[in-house]
Image: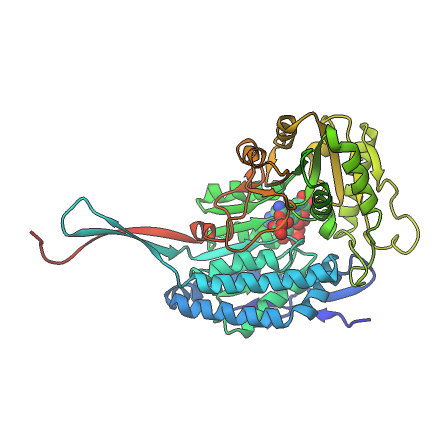
Amino acid sequence: MTTPVLLQHYIDGEWFDGDADALVSISPAEPDVTVAHGRAATVDAVDRAVAAARAAARRWARTPAHERGTVLVRAAAIIESSAPRWGAELAREEGKTRGEGVAEVLRAAQIMRFYGGEGDREAGEMFASPRRGERIMVARKPIGVVGVITPFNFPIAIPAWKIAPALTYGNTVVWKPAGTVPLLAMRLAQALHDAGLPPGVLNLVMGGRAIGAGIADHPGIDALTFTGSTAVGRSLAAAGAARGVPVQAEMGGKNAAVVLGDADLDLAAEQVLAGAFRSSGQKCTATSRLIVTEDVADEFVRELVARIGKWTVGNPLDEQVDMGPVIDAAARTSIRAGVDEAIRQGARALCGQRSYEDGELATGFYVPPTVLELPDTGLDVWREELFGPVLAVCRAADAEAAFALADDSDYGLSAAVFTQDLTRALGALEDLDVGILHINSESAGADPHVPFGGAKKSGYGPKEQGRAAREFFTHTTTVYLRGGRSIT
Ligand SMILES: NC(=O)C1=CN([C@@H]2O[C@H](COP(=O)(O)OP(=O)(O)OC[C@H]3O[C@@H](n4cnc5c(N)ncnc54)[C@H](OP(=O)(O)O)[C@@H]3O)[C@@H](O)[C@H]2O)C=CC1
Ligand SMILES: O=C(O)CCC(=O)C(=O)O
């Protein structure tokens, strides 16, 4: 058994123990195993973190962008070389498979490297002026101190794609990670510390919701970026609006995969399974609704269920395992309750009806991969995000009906469409109100150099990643620029 890691907070370049309640990170596969432990911070640590971030803000903003980027590039190298160890820790702490854990750590390194270069690119725009001898410059500047609140499901990649752009564009950060994944948060902060980030530029404060609320409401926070549930995201957006502070919130999804009769069904089955069940369905971009046209529905659904039957569910550190547990007991209970309610409302479970009540998976927070065939779209499971390995299937008469069903959601994060017909693929772009559209690939996944975020209830504020991140992490000053002598 591995010795639990000691958890420490990080303020003004110093590591220190918390002095509030116990902070314990357990393994969702083996809940009696402690992965890391320490003490949570008290809310007054937020005051100290904000003060440190404010004190560091001016100097960091005036540090040449190239120097700021160099720190991120060095952090990328540290993260990359730690990927095997940290990836295993991630699997132990969060429950995704070791392969997914290592891939996520490498993704964090890739994000750091991308933003390491991004600071060197243009820092504004120059416009012509209607007046002789004048140019108009729009200069981009950091916002100041950014509050970062992150979820459990990508414990290093999501923080990386918020913190890296914040830093590269010259802001300082106060960060609260999800309570279930403090170890990976500490690893990311360690990488930036070891890469030479100056004291106060990043501050990590771990603890419960009171810490999150303390950051969100703090008068010293100039902007807030959040990923997590729609309820919390909206409340933070409302609080930010009341204080006049910009908020970026990435929230839930109820993402559809649409499989049309002309699709390559083999490819579609592989991709729908990955989208629905990798990371136990705990991605905001996971496929939780499948719409398949009648002409191929029987064949496609049969194939899907046969394939998922071959997946191994179990300890995420075991190389043979395809899917691990969900994050905690509460998640397992609410996902199971959602499935039971769907069945009560008329859904037919094609697989996954039986939970792991005995045997070796009974003690971990396991939920079987579940496929539910729905009689119609009136069921709660069609609309409500369960955030687990549950796929709700509906049939459609044709492509037009299928797209209408896919768009029948309050959420609009991502969608996947499987077809070999370019006209239909382009039709999906028109018909689906989503932030991310995949044609012939799974609904999950995001590259660091392109915008990421959703429409409708899924997103609020400027998008994340790529160039879009600059919109949130900078503000502009428009400069009317004339020489000191009159020009005739
Ligand atoms: N769109 C997405 O990317 C994601 C969506 N979700 C959705 O959210 C649900 C719950 O997941 P979870 O990660 O717990 O999401 P939450 O929204 O509950 O939590 C996300 C982050 O916000 C913090 N937080 C919670 N309440 C407050 C508050 N009132 N003020 C300030 N910060 C707060 C959490 O802290 P703490 O952990 O200490 O409670 C965590 O750091 C999922 O079932 C899913 O539906 C979840 C993850 C990602
Ligand atoms: O699809 C991905 O890889 C990213 C998903 C994500 O951002 C999330 O689940 O919060």
Above or below, 58 against 323 in this view is below
Percent coordinates x, y for residue 392 in the rendering: 74, 36
Q: Residue at x 14, y 52 (%)?
A: 133
Q: Which quadrant of the structure image shows residue 438? A: top right
**Residue 48 appears in the picture as rendered:** no
Above or below, 115 against 265 in this view is below
Percent coordinates x, y for residue 170 in the rendering: 42, 61
Furthest toward the left, the residue is 488
Q: Is residue 31 left or right of residue 103?
A: right
Quadrant assignment for the N terminus: bottom right
Q: Residue at x 60, y 58 (%)?
A: 157
Above or below, 332 against 4 in this view is above
Given residues 148 and 347, the one toward you in this image is: 347
Given residues 34 and 17, the one toward you in this image is: 34
In this picture the colour scheme is rainbow
**Residue 145 appears in the picture as rendered:** yes
Q: Is residue 212 left or right of residue 332?
A: left
Percent coordinates x, y for residue 273 in the rendering: 74, 46
Q: Is residue 394 left or right of residue 285?
A: right
Percent coordinates x, y for residue 285 in the rendering: 64, 45
Q: How many marks?
A: 0
